[in-house]
Amino acid sequence: MKKKIAVIGSGFSGLSASAYLAKAGNEVHVFEKHDRPGGRARQFSTDDGYVFDMGPSWYWMPDIMDSFFADFGCQTSDFFELISLNPQFEVVFSEGKISIPESLEELKFLFERIEKGAGLQLEKFMQAAKFKYEVGMQDFINKPCHNWSEFLSFKIVKSAIKLDLLTGFRAYVAKYFKSEKLRTLMEFPVIFLGASPKDIPALYSLMNYGGYALGTHYPMGGFYQLVLAMKKVAENQGVYFHFNKTVESINTGSEKVSSLTINGKIHEFDAVIASSDYHHTETLLSKENRNYSEEFWQNRTFAPSSLIYYLGIDQNIPNLEHHTLFFENDLDEHIDSIYEEKKWPERPLFYSCCPSKTDSSLAPLGKENLFLLMPLAIGIDDGEATRELYLNNMLSRIERHTGIKDLRSKIEYKRSYCVSDFISDYNAYGGNAYGLANTLGQTAVLKPKIRNKGLKNLFYTGQLTVPGPGIPPSIISGKIVANELIKLKN
């Protein structure tokens, strides 16, 4: 029997869930508070010709995106051109810089030049990481995680030791490499998971394989092309999208959701999937119908927030790659400011994305589109004066790296985005940018549940539940929750 299903939010998990639900024969309506789809992956344009992706910029694990489109009989090339970046990215250290080549074989030679024997060690590391990636992505990450019994398959039990579930990532990397630079390069990918490398299970070396081995890609036209492509797939299945629609309350009765109040009007549905912030979604329910208390959320370890600047630069910037990591300062010092001290970092690290180096459509001719991002603790004050102070810090370091002078005077467009903006735009708990940290105590069954404990037709998806933060996990999360609702229907 066809069900009428509401999806709250049109981020990657909402787009994914809606497409799979409609494919199964349901009438699906997506409600988005903004005027366009994408959530944190929205895009905006300026009057003078700059086009900015607002959030995600690393196209890693392309096989996960390919798998989504294949499920609907199409492929990414039907919607956008995907190119492989070479170099993948550059890392600026206090002494010199390292460019990460497109080829894994070239990367082995690079490691060998930095540390004798490190080329062979990288090969061994990647072999183990490939195994974790294949098992993790095929057998581990696709579980709804209702209970631990889901992981008692012969393959997972047999692979448990090789998955290194109980080993810390930092200690694991140290077994392979002595060079501090190489350790930093190997630790960098897991920063996307929202915790210190010492607190993340070594299982997530699969990120190194998903990035360094499978490569760093870029969809021409900007990352937003992936959003538009997924929306088109969903529409082709019959999904209805409703923009500028704010869900104000989730109405219940007889142990289920009966309707949603949207822009002051009541709409009835047979089931609801919330791709919106999990904590915020629960505030739309009465307290007795919530899965978790306020104290529960206060005791979670959240991934960082971010200070972001979108800059239009009135000239070409020499010696700057598409992706650049400015790691001249101590990684642990910055991480401690996020998780231990919960304050603005004294000697920050930051990331620069200059997509106009690859895609001239994102900036006027002879100019640059520059995106700067600095990870921050959640819940801190983010006044404009403080933001500007850190912008000056980032600009001076770009000047030092590129040789350009007085970069600030070349800015013809500027917009900042920080903790309070994540809260106002996405109802993000504490202003987090990436969901819950993937620490051992917040992995798999220990993450917030995808199903409401008392309301049988209310489900949750996205980066605050399984599998976790990041675009590929969010796409998978949407598929997991759609399958759970479909099974309930059957």
Image (cartoon, helix red, strand yellow):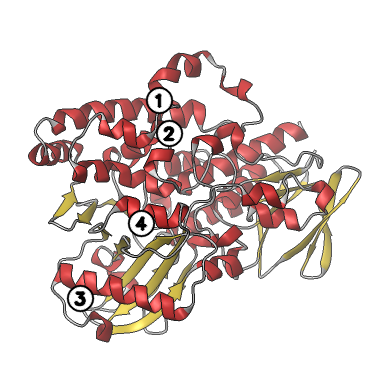
Q: Which residue lies under the disc numbered 3?
A: 316
Q: Would you say the residues marked 1 and 2 are in contact, meaning their CB atoms lie under 8 Å apart? A: yes
Residue 296 is situated, as x and y percent measured from the top left of the image, at 67, 46
Q: Would you say the residues marked 4 and 3 are in contact, meaning their CB atoms lie under 8 Å apart? A: no
Q: CA distance from mark 1 to mark 3?
A: 45 Å
Nearest to N terminus: mark 1 or mark 2: 1
Residue 81 visible to the viewer:
no
Residue 316 is situated, as x and y percent measured from the top left of the image, at 20, 76
Q: Which residue lies under the disc numbered 1?
A: 164
Residue 189 sits in which quadrant? top left
The tag on residue 243 is none
Q: Residue at x 65, y 27 (%)?
A: 147
- Looking at this view, is 20 or 376 the one in front? 376
Nearest to N terminus: mark 1 or mark 3: 1
User: From the viewer's perspective, is the residue at label 1 or at label 4 nearer?
Assistant: 4
Q: Residue at x 59, y 66 (%)?
A: 423
